[in-house]
Image (cartoon, rainbow, N blue to C red):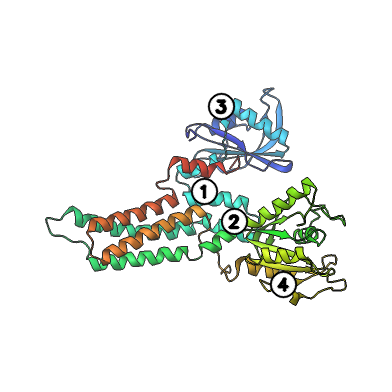
Amino acid sequence: MYSPDDTIVAVATPPGRGGIGVVRVSGPAAGGAAAAVLRAGGELQPRQATLTSVVAAAAPGRPLDQVVATYFPGPASYTGEDVVEISGHGSPVLLRQIVEAVVRAGARLAEPGEFTLRAFVNGRMDLIQAEAVADLIDAVTPLQARVAFDQLEGTVTATIASIDSALFDLTARLEASIDFPEEGYHFTAAVAVAAETRGLLQRTQALLANARSGRLVREGRQVVILGKPNVGKSTLFNRLLDAPRAIVTDVPGTTRDLLTETTEIDGLPVTLVDTAGIRATADAVESEGVARARGALEVAAAVLLVLDRSRPLEGADRDLLRETAAADRVVVVNKADRPARWEAPDVPAAGPCVTVSLREANDLCELRGALAEVLWGDEPLRDTPTLSNLRHILLVEQAAAALARAADAADAAAPEELILADLQDARGALEEVTGKRTAEDVLQRIFARFCIGK
């Protein structure tokens, strides 16, 4: 892991040009490093924005940029350490020079996620909240942002802390009973142990109840668009994205590789995959595209199968209908603006069938609704899901399994030592969720996905 004793610096705003760019400095020497590069005319006052200039590292004494510097003394800062944030003009060149000046003053470049890691290490947030920071930054839909912000506010933390507190009280009483067997003390009866454990199991299961919804919100789903050449797959891809992402021509075989883009369907992220038209071909490149299309079908959560209503159904259409019959599927009957050569009832029933004209500027609400129903059906997405992170879900499932074993053991009047072992396993899993006892390699993996500057 990174050294917590260093003073670190990084650009905290996204790469590229902007009106403002922020350089963040954190660590025991943050104030001194900032003072070495600023012309503040005195010490920075805590939590007061100070208009000043930055001195260039290459030419000491020459002003580089006019900035606003703000000093946040620890522990009441984002990282729990002394922090100075320097807000300058959002030129990548200027921001890089500010960082270089601070490095020359004794700081080092921050690693990805190191500011938030320090906030975790210094007790400013637990691991659930730290992971929520990354989720909030990565959010692409309002619902994703809302779930991440609720977790950052401590909704999951409070629920798990409540369960863990009750679990700690129960294990303490069992341990006391084991520690004083010769006195005949029993700080809790076997019937009470079983009842309390069942109650904790129910609370844990309630936490898991909407975990699938949470994963849907956080991770989204992948949808592959299939069909013969020239049935309108790429047009559908563009219409759902509301952008001309895929090339559309009348020449069969225009799309030869997989095109992927993320869009929003009913508030949830969906990765759309446009594919090569499925047909037999002697072209080596197109054949590879067809093979990749079939490979995408194997891992997709749902299929949009596009059929051309203006041409008779062919063997290739029926083959695709058979291949996708077991998949979660929406059949898109395209080219409704042309004379029909067949009707929707001719399509074998397996999932919804929606008739559209993709050439016209008509609304795709019915198609989006059908796709949403196929993807998440009756999942209760009205309320914000509590759990969304797979790591959290797996650990809470471990805790629930351990509590179930402990409850069964208590019902069978098993020795207190056996019950206690399962209860301690449950506590260990819950503490891994919040980071109280998380291995170093897990922390490295979690914070490595953060952006530099956060």
Q: Upstream in the sequence, badge 1 or badge 4?
A: 1
User: Residue pushed farthest top?
Assistant: 59
Q: Quadrant of the C terminus?
A: top right
Q: Are marks 4 and 2 in contact (CB under 8 Å)?
A: no
| Kind of element beneath mark 3 | loop
Disc 3 residue crowd, few under 14, some 14–19, many 20+, Cα 10 Å: some
Q: CA distance from mark 3 to mark 1?
A: 27 Å
Instruction: Tell me if residue 265 can be seen.
Output: no
Q: Upstream in the sequence, badge 3 or badge 1?
A: 3
The residue labelled by disc 4 is 353
Q: Upstream in the sequence, badge 3 or badge 2?
A: 3
Instruction: Tell me if residue 324 can be seen.
Output: yes
Q: Name the front one of labels 1 and 2.
A: 2
- Quarter of image, res 84: top right
The residue labelled by disc 3 is 106
- Quarter of image, res 365: bottom right
Query: What amino acid is found at the position of numbered circle 2 in the picture?
Result: Glu
- Quarter of image, res 165: bottom left
Q: CA distance from mark 1 to mark 4?
A: 43 Å
Placement of 144 over or under 284, stated as above or below: below
Q: Are marks 3 and 4 in contact (CB under 8 Å)?
A: no
Q: Is residue 411 left or right of residue 237?
A: left
Q: CA distance from mark 3 to mark 2?
A: 40 Å
Q: Looking at the picture, how far across and down is residue 330, in whole percent?
A: 69, 68
The residue labelled by disc 1 is 130
Q: Upstream in the sequence, badge 3 or badge 4?
A: 3
Query: What amino acid is found at the position of numbered circle 4 in the picture?
Result: Cys
Q: Is residue 21 left or right of residue 434?
A: right
| Kind of element beneath mark 1 | helix
Q: Looking at the picture, how far across and down is residue 203, in whole percent?
A: 40, 65
Query: What amino acid is found at the position of numbered circle 3 in the picture?
Result: Gly
Residue at position x 68%, y 74% from top? Answer: 349
